[in-house]
Image (cartoon, coloured by chain):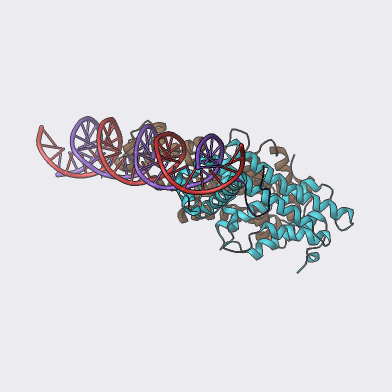
Chain colours: A brown, B cyan, C red, D purple
DNA sequence: GATTTGACTGGGTCGCCAGTCAGGATCGTT
DNA sequence: AACGATCCTGACTGGCGACCCAGTCAAATC
């Protein structure tokens, strides 16, 4: 129980750090190659580590993938919470949430991960649970922003939860389209759809959104 | 070139029929086991046929899967077209389209197929193309029904294409939620969301929808 | 400085599965 | 009947990939 000093890592810290490193590499590899063609050895290579080490830290490949999805989901929800805790009017915060939803460039392919995860979640209850929490997080945040806007007198909405579900659904669906067929749906058009629908849901004019 | 008689099949017909049978079995197996754990031999078993025969009719597994997705997509669009060609007012036809969108029971898991296909489409351009056509079909049909309703004076909408895209997106997203977490989104609630959003898009009252 | 514990290596194994192939059955044609 | 084309079988294979394990090395503990 010596060495609780700052910089130096204890044995346990080292293991934690390595695990995090592996989760990170796993996410990168899955994003690049897709879940179906991701090999444990690919993740090992991406971490400059032997294949055996993966199974030292994670019993099975499924464990690793599931842990990676959980970590990614949790970090996403955390960032979301920061957004609605930020400054500005309700409509400014709502707009920030919408923009956070939409991948900001062709290179930001983070949604690919969730497409893989949806397919996986159909068969794997653990994965399904993670997805439920992630989606619940989004809906909760949207519903919260809407309620904040109502309290501030900015918004009118007789069912914030329902509105949040509809918005979340629409964004999910449109992002799929955008991710798969970027030619058929530009980011600009996607954001425009989001603002139109959101404006209707909260009873404000589309023009109320910031430029 | 003899034997163009009805019941008896020529050799070419027999091959076509066998191919269709294999596509059908492929769909059933993929729905049941998921794309990731579907083996060629599973499809052979489901058709009561040897493993080798699959590769007689389809060069590779990918060919078979792609052909199956294409066939399924085309049949779906065909059924959709029948719906909007059917009788009734525009709002009745619109409602029929919405209801066709939503799986009618827990046992109708056809959407699972498209979750797998989305993930696959990220890597496979052929699959992506099929998905683009399917989604384009849905949007086109929705936009068509809306336009029909406008001509009939039932609907008001200044951007039928945009409205169709938003509706299609919302339904996609909500159906994912319904498929994955039936506990978090009942069919009834899903349909309610669809009707609320659709009513807004076409400028009618929610109560205008048939009971 | 001796010993124990934990992190890590890399080669090996074992099962699985897409695709092949040689041969057999069946059909249409002449 | 004979023959070629087509449909089909089932055993086989070659490669791959998750997981195992015996052993190494360094850090922590005594």
- Position in image of residue C14 (x %, y %): 28, 44
- Horizontal arrangement in the rendering, residue A54 relative to residue A163 (left or right): left
Highlighted magenta segment, given as a residue range: B1-10
- Given residues A64 and B146, the one toward you in this image is B146
- Given residues A115 and D27, the one toward you in this image is A115
Q: Is residue B7 magenta?
A: yes
- Horizontal arrangement in the rendering, residue B171 relative to residue B28 (left or right): right
The quadrant in which residue B118 appears is top right
The residue sitting at the bottom extreme is B211
In the rendered view of the protein, which quadrant contains the C terminus of chain A?
top right
- Horizontal arrangement in the rendering, residue A207 relative to residue A52 (left or right): right
Q: Is residue B13 magenta?
A: no
- Horizontal arrangement in the rendering, residue D29 relative to residue B75 (left or right): left
- Position in image of residue B162 (x %, y %): 77, 46
- Position in image of residue B201 (x %, y %): 79, 54
- Residue depicted at x 63% and y 37%: A104
Q: Can residue B123 be seen from the camera position used here?
A: no
In the displayed structure, A27 sits above or below B205; it is above
- Position in image of residue A62 (x %, y %): 41, 47
């Amino acid at each position: 129980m010596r060495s609780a000093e700052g910089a130096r890592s204890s044995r346990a810290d080292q293991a934690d750090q390595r695990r995090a490193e592996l989760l990170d590499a796993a996410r990168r590899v899955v994003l690049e190659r897709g879940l179906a063609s991701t090999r444990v050895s690919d993740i090992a290579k991406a971490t400059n580590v032997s294949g055996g080490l993966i199974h030292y830290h994670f019993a099975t490949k499924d464990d690793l993938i599931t842990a990676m999805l959980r970590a990614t989901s949790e970090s996403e929800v955390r960032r979301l919470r920061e957004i609605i805790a930020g400054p500005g009017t309700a409509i400014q915060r709502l707009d920030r949430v919408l923009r956070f939803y939409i991948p900001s460039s062709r290179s930001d392919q983070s949604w690919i991960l969730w497409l893989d995860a949806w397919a996986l979640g159909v068969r794997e209850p653990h994965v399904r649970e993670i997805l439920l929490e992630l989606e619940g997080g989004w809906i909760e945040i949207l519903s919260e922003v809407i309620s904040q806007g109502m309290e501030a007198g900015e918004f009118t909405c007789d069912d914030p939860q329902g509105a949040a579900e509809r918005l979340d659904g629409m964004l999910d669906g449109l992002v799929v389209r955008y991710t798969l067929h970027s030619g058929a749906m530009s980011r600009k058009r996607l954001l425009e759809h989001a603002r139109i629908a959101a404006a209707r849901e909260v009873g404000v004019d589309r023009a109320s959104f910031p430029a």
